[in-house]
Amino acid sequence: MPKALLFVVILLLSYGFWLSDEFKGIAMGISIFLFGMLSLEQGFKAFTGGMLERILQKTTDTTWKSLSFGIVSTMLMQSSTLVSIITISFLSAGLLDLIAGIGIIFGANLGSTTGAWLIAGLGLKVKISAYAMPMLVFGVLCSFQNNKQLKGIGYILTGLGFLFLGIHYMKESFETFENTIKLADYAIPGLKGLLIYTLVGIIATMIMQSSHATLVLIITALSVHQITYDNALALAIGSNIGTTFTAVIGSLSANVQGKRLAGAHLLFNLLTGIIALIFIREFIIAVDMINAALGIAAADNTLKLATFHSLFNLVGVVIMLPFMNHLAALLEKIFVEKRPNLFRPKYLNSSATGFPETVVESVRLESIHLYEHGIHIILHTFGLRKRNLSDQSDLKQLIEHNNGPVEYDIDAGYEKRIKGIYSAIIAFISQANFTWEMKQSSKLTWLRDANRMLVEAIKDTKHLQKNWGRSRTSKNQATRDEYKKIAYQIVLLIQQIEKFRQEIAENELPLLSLDVLKVSIEDEDMQMNRSIDTLIRERKITPETGSSLINDSTYMYNIKKNLIKTAETLFVHDNANTMRIEQQLALNEAEIKEIVQAVDAPITDNL
Amino acid sequence: MNKEKLLHKLQAFFDPAQKRKKRHIEELKKILRKLKKKEQKITGKIEQADDDCLKKLYQTELEIIRLQRKKGIDVLQQLREHKGSSD
């Protein structure tokens, strides 16, 4: 809330408190209710360390599924805001597409209308304050526990307790308010009233940042006839529009995907509101008919309001559902994804920090982004480009005939392409809350290690560059050949990793198939050392050149080992269960060496 | 079903560690089957390969898969023994 507006609200509230005790009671009721909402959200967040995300990932592959997810999750959590925030996080991290996100938001709008039913049907008919007290006691008791789940349940119980208590205070205060001032006397009939009260509903929800709080206020006021039924309908329409304000504010820190989703939320609620305003008479008739069919008394305005709230949101969903693809296309046009600055982080944004899964996925995607830059640097060092890695290219030929000057500035490349993104990843990981489940924490540790290994590979490439550059002008054929072999083996491994990446979807045992590459690295290292020994023995190279070659072949070995470990962490990530077993069966260093000894022959043919 | 057996079944049903172990064994068996299939495929490739270099390449892959399978079978045996002793 802007500071000036906050100041005005505080002044107005203070004036109101001075004027009337009942007003104070209503405001206290709203505050307790809002605090209950916060506590409820906090409680549900305790369960978002995996379960909710897993459900979200599995149940949003079709429009109906995402719509149902939105309805059910909002119905259970009674907070469309929490559902919107989770959806924005998932969308920002690339775990959901825009259509699925829009489906969830539509569903959340419909699901949130159950709140009005609960308040009108249960909150006002039953003495809920009697339930509030034990809930608060048990809730506080549970929230003091160390167990995460129990703590979550504690917050949920406390939240519900405060919600009930808030409703109770609002109801009581409105009842006594009735004896002093009759707000219904200020009712404005007709179109003017409709528009003014819609605006009041928008502003009230924008200030309270909760359509639930506005609705409970409307329903309790309506139950004691402090506002007219017509004005209550307008207020409900206003609250539906005002609630998008929270989503719009939340999307300001999100990336373009988050902004698109907030746009969808705004457009949906605005359009639904306009439809409800235009066809208000028809809606009133329809509500009367539905309530009559459901056996609800014609005089029960609070339940009629709940029916109206559900009905106009349902109509909105029915109208908008066929145009979901058009809506997504329109939003993609309005919020154009800026051509990303290649050298800046693409996937790390604050909207992804809310949930463990989105943090891990954002870091993984950003690490792949960094890997691409790392590969760019290594390939350029040897005078090659990424396009040269395609299967059609004969790497041997390319390296053999690449005799032009190659003076790639690795330091400048590192500063430009690596440092900024690498630092951003490290900062992002360190900001993550490590009290999460161990699983997520260890995934982040692996990703951090993968990035470190990539950086080490680049640094080793830099060490190697000096002698490799010199060798290109060497008069000694054997020296030239050995350095070409080094370049070839590094580039070949990068090509094999690329191939592995492309075929990973069809690879049934991705982690285990990487063992073949690991064995080839060990084997090539053994062959290389043997070859250098032979060259020195046969006096084809001097011992000085031999020692440089041994050092550089060690750099090559380290580059390859680091690249394969990086690829293993970045690209093999699905199905945690299978992966754990594959890890058990994957060969360790000693076993790899054992295989190399057994085979003892070059796997990749030499240059 | 006698009472003792029923009790064991109930115990297994309510014991999450036991359930996890059972799932682990199932997954492991699936992986071992895939490895077996891969092994057969590569054996076929070795028989068909004319090039010595290619033959050697497949031979290495075969050795790797055999070792992975051996490790898998050992893990499976250990899990079964452990399961048996805890039953």
Image: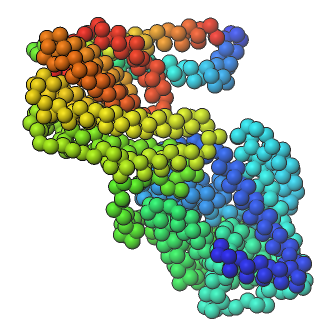
Q: Is residue B68 left or right of residue B39?
A: right
Task: Find residue A252 and report its horizontal and vertical position in percent.
Answer: 52, 66
Q: Is residue A532 left or right of residue B3?
A: left
Q: Quadrant of the C terminus of chain A?
A: top left
A295 or A494, nearer to the observer: A494
Specify the quadrant of the image occupied by residue A403. Answer: top left
Specify the quadrant of the image occupied by residue A166. Answer: bottom right
Q: Is residue A467 left or right of residue A425?
A: left
A266 or A325, nearer to the observer: A266
Task: Find residue A588 and report its horizontal and vertical position in percent.
Answer: 42, 17
A10 or B2, nearer to the observer: A10
Q: Quadrant of the N terminus of chain A?
A: bottom right
Q: Is residue A176 left or right of residue B31?
A: right
Tell me how the rendering is colored: rainbow
Q: Residue, x 57% and y 68% (percent of image)?
A: A249
- Is residue A492 in view? no
Task: Find residue A310 and report its horizontal and vertical position in percent.
Answer: 60, 68
**In this rendering, is residue A174 above or below A427?**
below
Q: Residue, x 73% and y 89% (percent of image)?
A: A187
Task: Find residue A406 and report its horizontal and vertical position in percent.
Answer: 18, 43
Question: How many labels, in total?
Answer: 0
Q: Residue, x 69% and y 71% (percent of image)?
A: A208
Q: Residue, x 28% and y 26% (percent of image)?
A: A552
A59 or A430, nearer to the observer: A430
- Is residue A187 in view? yes
**In this rendering, is residue A336 above or below A362?**
below
